[in-house]
Image (spheres, rainbow, N blue to C red):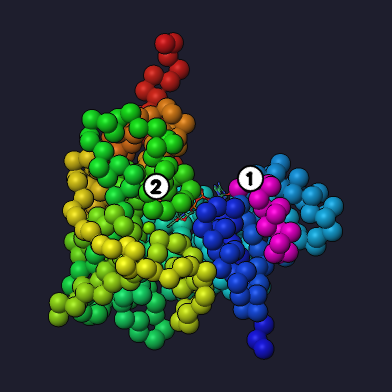
Amino acid sequence: MTRPSGVAVLGSTGSIGVSTLDVVSRHPGRFKVVALGAHSNLQRLREQCLVHKPRFAVLTDTTAAAQLKSDLAAAGLATQVLAGGAALSEIAAHPEVEYVMAAIVGAAGLASTLAAAAAGKRVLLANKEALVMSGPLLMQMVSSGGATLIPIDSEHNAIFQCLPVSPGTVTGTPGNRGVRRILLTASGGPFLRTPERDLVGVTPEQACAHPRWVMGRKISVDSATLMNKGLELIEACLLFAVPPSLVEIVVHPQSIVHSLVEYLDGSVLAQLGNPDMRTPIAHALGWPERLESGVESLNLIKVGRLDFEAPDPDRFPALRLARAAAEAGGTAPAVLNAANEIAVAAFLERRLAFTRIPAVIEEVMNAHPIVPVKALGDVLAADAWARQRATSVLTPFAGAVR
Ligand code: NAD
Ligand code: MG
């Protein structure tokens, strides 16, 4: 029997991280958890370490890491505990690790995702923000590092499943594949039917109560503003080497059809399934084979109907902003992403109204002189600039006596 493949789960304490460990646990002969990484959720990481006995555990919060170290030693575990952000990149590139689940939320996951790509790992990419920020750089690093990038985002995993794969290539294959259009489906989020005048007062609790998916708070807010779909539009263009004009967004409230690819001959291929992230996770872990994921069979009779409609650009301006960033390229997507991260955090802390999220992003984007991205420094500079600018847009009177 062959030796189990080493897996590192970065962002293990989050929604995707927990689903990944669930799928991995179903295949003990095939996978071995070598490393777990997270920010500060000591209790959950400790539990995960006790179950999976990884060789490494990382917490970027140093106080929590010190506590984890003493807890695991007291439990008699040989797990080596590391602290700080650089340790995430170290474990992402570790020789015993073959598969890296990149499931840290936001720009915080960029460095470790790049490290996994440069080290030639199979990168299971959930951390869409890393791709949106660094765009062609990450894709170049995947090919120069000999990595295999498989999308975890359910829509992109669906598109990947509907595209022909030529030997040796997975994503980012330009050329004539006969694709006419990519149809990216969107659930529409919790406010699909909320009148515009009521959106201003929505609370973080309402925004995070997604009708179909249980997810982390940041992506839940992104799904409510539809910025999640905007980021996914950029993600699709990068992963599959298509221009934004070829990607159409279709609202599909049931979240059963995860996306579609239309070919020149009129054929439209779709991937369907229950809305459960264990399906794309198992697909990416097993590819090109298929693995049991624990996901229930799709009961089409119970689902009954599949509806499709156009998104409303007036209530959801995030789509327009993201499409503009996708078309502009260069540092524009990094700026969009950074301004969005700041605005969403402010909304979650009740410092910003829901409807102001796209307004803040637009203000930052309008003030940004877009430059081409030649090196990582260009991305990091744009990210830092946009965060600062968004913060000052949020607090125009900071320092003033009010
Ligand atoms: P989550 O909030 O549930 O988990 C986030 C994880 O990232 C946690 O483990 C947390 O410890 C870690 N983290 C946060 N900040 C960090 C930092 N500064 N340094 C190191 N680690 C940090 O989020 P999630 O819903 O699991 O989403 C994770 C990623 O996957 C996001 O990029 C999201 O867009 C993407 N994604 C999620 C889903 C989903 O269904 N949840 C679907 C598609 C894509
Ligand atoms: Mg998605």
Which image quarter holds the N terminus? Answer: bottom right
Please indicate, yes or no, whether residue 281 appears anywhere in the rendered image.
no
Q: Position of residue 226 (x, y in %)?
A: 31, 47
Are the residues flagged by discs 2 and 1 in contact, CB closer than 8 Å? no
Name the quadrant containing residue 186: bottom left
Q: Is residue 42 visible?
A: yes
Element type at mark 2: loop
- Figure quarter occupied by ligand 2: bottom left
Dominant secondary structure (helix, strand or loop) of the stretch shown in magenta:
helix
- Which residue is tagged 1? 40
Is 259 positioned to the left or the right of 61 in the image?
A: left
Residue at figure coordinates x 68%, y 47% from the top left: 42
Label at residue 210:
2
Front residue of 209/200: it is 209
**Which residues lie in the magenta part?**
39-54
Residue at position x 19%, y 55% in the image: 309
Label 2 Cα neighbours within 10 Å, binned few <14 / some 14-19 / many ≥20: many
> Residue drawn at (44%, 65%), measured in percent from left and top?
152
Q: Position of residue 401 (x, y in %)?
A: 44, 10
Residue 316 in percent (x, y) is at 25, 43
- x and y, in percent, of residue 294 in the image: 52, 69
Magenta residue check for 324: no
Residue at mark 1: C-beta within 8 A of ligand 1: yes
Between circles 2 and 1, the one closer to the viewer is 2
Q: Badge 1 local density, few (<14 within 10 Å), some, or many (20+)?
A: some
Instruction: Describe the element under mark 1 as helix, strand or loop.
Output: loop
